[in-house]
Amino acid sequence: QCIKCPATTYSALPGATGSGDCIPCAKGKFSTAPAGAASEDICQPCPTGTYSIAGAESCSKCAPGEFQDSEGESSCTSADAGSYVPAAGLSEQTPCPAGNYSGSAASECAACGPGYATADGIDCVICPSGRSSGNASNVECGVCPAGTYSIAGASECAECEEGSFSDDAAFVCTLCPAGQSSAARASECEPCP
């Protein structure tokens, strides 16, 4: 009595003598055909967003943070830094929105906090002295206007006090020289009356 090759395998060899003559569907393919198949035609490629090991009855979805944009693959690709894949079984990655960032294999992006910004979607960079970012999700740090200043990582620019002044992008206010004065938030000092 002949024994059929198991499901997910096939054999086109007449007179096969054992289960070693039954060939499993290759990686990246699957089969739902019953036992006893005689042709590789039973093996179908996994659709995009999925993958399989050899001899699979079904394809597995790529996990969140991974994607597969080709059919018939045996593995998934991790999302690049600066991109994300929010759900299982997807065929493409999505760039992070402006002012947000991610590492590789991310399923979501995060906002840079106040005092930080990201232009590339990969790293949050601290705002240097003389600049600030007051909100989350900043693409760049704004320049502190004349009459204000900031230290590195500031979420907002601080006003210069009376008797001091500053230029644009200042990290400190300068005291007015003797015989001069200024109001708060001044860009220059005036001679005393």
Image (tube, rainbow, N blue to C red):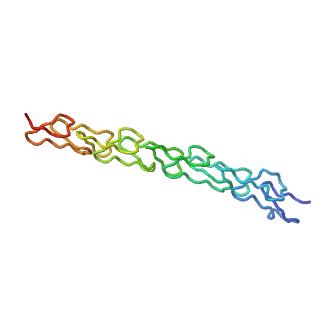
Q: Is residue 83 left or right of residue 129?
A: right
Residue at x 90% of width, y 60% of height: 2
Q: Quadrant of residue 159?
A: top left
Residue at x 78% of width, y 50% of height: 32
Q: Is residue 81 left or right of residue 70?
A: left
Image quadrant containing the N terminus: bottom right
Residue at x 42% of width, y 41% of height: 137
Q: Is residue 93 left or right of residue 54?
A: left
Image quadrant containing the C terminus: top left
Q: Quadrant of residue 163?
A: top left
Residue 180 placement (x, y as % from top left) = 10, 39
Residue 42 placement (x, y as % from top left) = 79, 55
Image height check: is 174 above or below 16?
Answer: above
Q: Is residue 91 left or right of residue 108?
A: right
Residue 157 placement (x, y as % from top left) = 28, 39
Image height check: is 2 above or below 132?
Answer: below
Q: Between 25 and 143, which is closer to the camera in this rendering?
A: 143
